[in-house]
Amino acid sequence: MLIFLIGFMGSGKSTLGKQLAKKLNYQLIDQDSYIEKKTGISVGNYFSSNGEEAFRKLEHESLIELSKLENAVISTGGGAPCFYNNIEIMNNSGISIYLKLKPEILFSRLKYAQNERPLIKGKTEEELFGFIKTKLSERESFYLKAKHVIESMDLKSEDLFQLVKYHGLN
Ligand code: S3P
């Protein structure tokens, strides 16, 4: 079984992914870290040297590789489901779960975590909130293609574990 956690930056994919993987006794793979291992540079540096388009290509290629795994939880990059046929790849190879959060909550989390994220680095609070609202509404139709959509405010990894268990584990 392969589980893809998808959602906007700051939606808790990595944190919840780690906890869920532990409960399932699966490996956790963070897609950005996977890409960083392959390229040898950080996503931020890759973006600034090669641009977003090149990053999206790399992200797509990495997803094809990751979709061949078994017994893993993949915390995907926030933009991953919105480019190429990535969301279809996820849905054809495993269970995708959209961790859905309101822009206000994403903002409160992301304002302290901008530096390592090239798309929001250096934005003022006002710019950041505007960016989150606009991008989220652009991306929502892709995110909503996930097999499961779950409001992730106060979401516990146990809730995710139960969802995954109920939908076909073991
Ligand atoms: C991105 C999200 C980031 C990372 C890259 C682009 C996006 O991942 O892939 O900076 O387009 O939303 P996280 O969602 O893990 O921050």
Image (cartoon, rainbow, N blue to C red):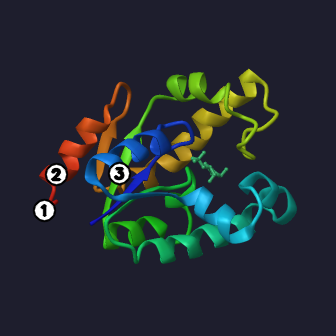
- Badge number at residue 165: 2
The x and y percentages for residue 78 are 55, 50
Proximity of marks 2 and 1: CB atoms separated by less than 8 Å: yes
User: Which mark is first along the chain, 2 or 3?
Assistant: 3
Q: Within 10 angstroms of label 3, few (less than 14), some, or many (20 or more) residues?
A: many
**What SS does tag 1 mark?**
loop
Q: Residue at x 66, y 65 (%)?
A: 37
The x and y percentages for residue 121 are 77, 38
Q: Is residue 90 above or below residue 79?
A: below
Question: Which residue was labeled with disc 1?
Answer: 170
Kindly identify the amino acid type of the residue bearing the numbered disc 1.
Asn
The x and y percentages for residue 138 are 55, 47
Kindly identify the amino acid type of the residue bearing the numbered disc 3.
Ala
Question: Which residue was labeled with disc 3?
Answer: 21
**What SS does tag 3 mark?**
helix
Residue at mark 3 to residue at mark 1: CA–CA distance: 15 Å
Q: Is residue 81 above or below residue 112?
A: below
Q: Is residue 127 above or below residue 150?
A: above
Residue at mark 2 to residue at mark 1: CA–CA distance: 7 Å
Question: Quadrant of the image for the C terminus?
Answer: bottom left
Q: Is residue 32 left or right of residue 69?
A: right
